[in-house]
Structure formats: C-alpha cells, structure tokens
Amino acid sequence: MNTRLKVVLAGAVHPNMPGDDRGVIEKAITEMQVYAKKYAFDLAVWKSPISSEDNAEEVRRFCEAEEADFTLLINASLPFGRIMLPLAKVRGRLGFWSFPEPTRDGVLQLNSFCGVNLMGSLLSHYSRRPGVPGKWFYGQPESPMFAERLRCTIRALQAIKGLGSLRIGQIGGLANGFENMYVDERDLESKFGTYLQTRHSVEEIVARAVKLPDSQVAEEIAKARAEAKRVTVSDEHLAKSTRVFMACRDFARENRYDALAISCWARFQEVYGIAVCGAMSRLNEQGILAVCEADIFSTVCMAAMKAMTGEKPALNDLVSLDESDNSLNLWHCGVAPTSWADSKGVTWDCHFNIGHYDGKTWCGDGMVADMNFRPGPVTIVSMGGRFDRLFLVTGEVMAGKPGYAGSSGWVKNIAINGQAVDIPVLINSIATHGVNHHYSTSYQDLTFEWNEFAAWMGIAVLPPLEYKPYVQSSPV
C-alpha cells in the first residue's frame, strides 16, 4: 500500500503589487521543505512565479509530469484570475494559500487574501471541478493554523492514496447473518481504486498450514511465546494457531496483499477445529491487516487509519454501555495487535465461547489474544452504504477499568464527530442511522483527518441524533 504523497508547490503573483511577493514565495518554499521532512511527503517546486495563463498551463503540465497528489498554490499577491483555468484541470487535489498583509494601512502591499478569495470562487463557480474544489490555507508557514491544516490534509490524502493501491484478499465468505456488511467490489474499486479478490477459501489456508515443516513451526511458536506475558492455551492449539498465522502471512506476501478479510467462523472450526483470533492478532501486530468475518468495510477503514497514523489499528464490536460514567466497551474475541495491551500484557488463552465442556472443565478451541487496552485517545469508525456513509466516534480508553475476556477496553469522553454525547444519544444515533456493528479503531483523535477524508471522497459523516422517546428516521 503506497501512501507517500507527491506535493507540488507553485507561487502566483500580481505584476504591479508593491509588496515583496517573491520573498513570500521564497520563504514558503523553504518552510515547506521542512514540512516535507516532518510529515514525510515528497515536494516538487515550480520556482518561477506564475503571472499569466500561459505560465499556469506550464505548471499544469509540470503537475501532471510529477503525478502530483496535491498542488498547493501560493497566492503571494493577487494573481490574474485566469491562471485558475488550467490549474483547475490538474488531476490531484488543490489547495490555495494566502498570507497576512505586512502592513495595516497605507498602500496595500500584497492583496494576498483577495487572491485566495478569487481562486476559491473560480474553482467553485466557474471551473465545475467535481467534488470538493479545493482547500484554503492562511497564515505564515510557521503559524499553528497553517501547520494544523497542512497536517490534516497530508494525513487524509495519505489514506486516500493508500486505498488506491490497497490489495485485499478475502478468505472465505462473509459471515452468515452479517448481510449488513455485504459490499459490491465494483463499488469499492470505483470509490477508492482498491483491489479485492474474493475467491480464496479457508480450505486453501488450512492446506498450507498443515504442510508447514515442524521445525519452522517450532521456531515460530517460540516467537509467539515471547510476545506474551502468559500462555494458558494448550500446546496443540498454540501450534495450530501458529500454523494458521504462518500460512496467512506467507499467502499475503506471495499475493502482495496488504490486508486479509478472513471468514474466521465457523468454517475454520469446521475444517481445522480452532478459532483463529490469536493468529489474526499476530498478523495485525506484524503489519498485515487481518479483519474478522470477512468484513470489507472495516478492512478499508483500518487501512485508512494505518495510512493516517502509521500505527496498527484494530477491529471491535461495541458491546456494553455504562451510564454511571458514560463509557462504552470496545471488544472482540482476541484479534487486537499485541501492542494494544496495557501494562498487564497479553495472555495467549483458549477461546472462551468456541469449544466444549469436558465435565465441568472448559476446553476452548483455538487461541485468543486476551488483553485490556492501554489508555489513550482513540478514534472509532464504521462505514456503510456504498462506501458513502461514515460514523465517527472519539473517546479515551480508561486505565484500570477491567474489560471482558478477549481484547477489550472501556472508553470515556465519548463524542460523535467532535460533539460530546451521552449514552442515550449514542444508542439513538447508532440505531437510527443503521450503523454497521463493526468498529475500526485506532489510537489518536482523528476527527479532523476523517472529516477531510470524507469531504474529498464525497462521504457523508453521520451526525449525532438527539434522543427522543419516539421512533426517528435518519436525515442522511
């Protein structure tokens, strides 16, 4: 999955403004080179100031040659409006940047802000550019507002670019009864450019797993033991889980898959006699996204989160609500990356509800990553429809509040798209909007990044819905 952006920077000037507009461009170029290192993007600079439509056409061709993902136009002074006609045709996203006036009276020096006003209006009302026409920036390059807006844009566009090269292998079918998560792969390709192959089977992975040499499996079992603080699962199921992990890992590498959407029940239990949660936890920790129940919506969201943050995301259900402290519990059987564990670490344990009793002794089938999540801010999203609806929640994982068996954490300070909500509003919003029951989760508050992502991609971010005692319908 390629997430590294190419940003083109170009400056426009008015031939008759008395201010040092060329000095403004030079400073912007210097500071953007610093940002390129800080935010890890590639920067290409058009060094000649744009002062005519012909200049702008040269810049458009330059952007195409550089395969620019984002073109940022410096409005150092009020530019000639027709420069936007060719620039509006660049294939990547556009931004336009203005600067404060160097004086507060006397002769107007730059008229830079008017330039952004003009460029934005031309994009919106004349160019007929589809989707969001462009993003404004204002301020000196070292100003906090400029830095925040640029960081938000870079992260959102990293996610969009990453999804364009994302390769997903679906292993087995969508979990029976989870028809709410059905996707048409043509919608996925049309929306993001993502590749999805749905023809792989659980049997294919199990056949690989059983053929692995015992010596290689033994080496990998030793690594798995070292990754956990405790191992309480049986040796048999630790070995089987390790074989599934290795088979999936090698399968993903051979097929160049960034993510595996795995039909983790019930076919694996029928074919191989185990739940594969622990294997999926290890895949997620090692950078191969492993998503439960063949959920493609969550695979896309987790890949976007990984592109935004560089960190490892997880899949959860929202399973419990505590009105005493206005918190929610995120949980899944045991697939979260091991790095999500709090100071108590990870236990490789047997599955707690897939298995059987031998007398009064529970015998779980398969291995799970049992952990409480470490404290910190998190973002929780669920996508639906035809990849055109996004439910966005943020909060903070609580320290010291025990969760459920499996991978679990309690989250306080709940907000829906930045608006603090209580439990009744949360329930009403989820149920009324018809939100999918899987939630992709990442550490960090990504409210701004997801909103920009949604704006560029034409995705509706679902609003919180005030609780009422009567039935309601979603406005979106």
Image: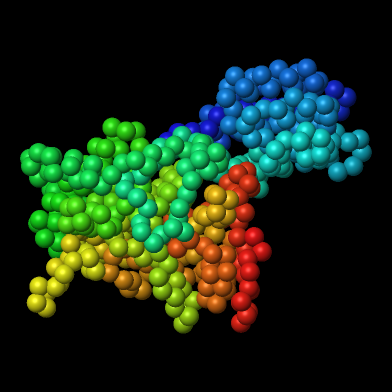
Left or right of residue 146: residue 273 = left
Q: Position of residue 177 (x, y in %)?
A: 39, 62
Residue 405 vs residue 92: left or right?
left
- Residue 226 appears in the figure: no
- Its colouring scheme is rainbow
Q: Residue furthest left?
A: 215
User: In the image, is residue 411 above or below residue 147?
Assistant: below
Q: Is residue 170 visible?
A: yes
Rendered location of residue 429, percent (x, y): 57, 69
Q: Answer with left or right where residue 88 lies relative to residue 318.
A: right
For image coordinates 15% across by 61% down, the residue present is 233
Residue sitting farthest toward the right: 106
In this rendering, the answer to whether 213 lies above or below 51 is: below
Q: Quadrant of the N terminus?
A: top left
**Of the pair 269 and 224, the residue shown nearer to us:** 269
Q: Quadrant of the C terminus?
A: bottom right
Q: Residue at x 34, y 40 (%)?
A: 199
Q: Image point 36% across, 73% down: which residue?
A: 401
Count of picture labels? 0
Pick whichever, 308 or 359, lies toward us: 359
The quarter of the picture where residue 417 lies is: bottom right
The structure residue drawn at horizontal position 34% and vertical position 33%, both measured from the top left corner, is: 256
Left or right of 21 on screen, residue 274: left
Horizontal and vertical percent position of residue 321:
44, 75
Give the image location of residue 204, x and y in percent.
Answer: 23, 42
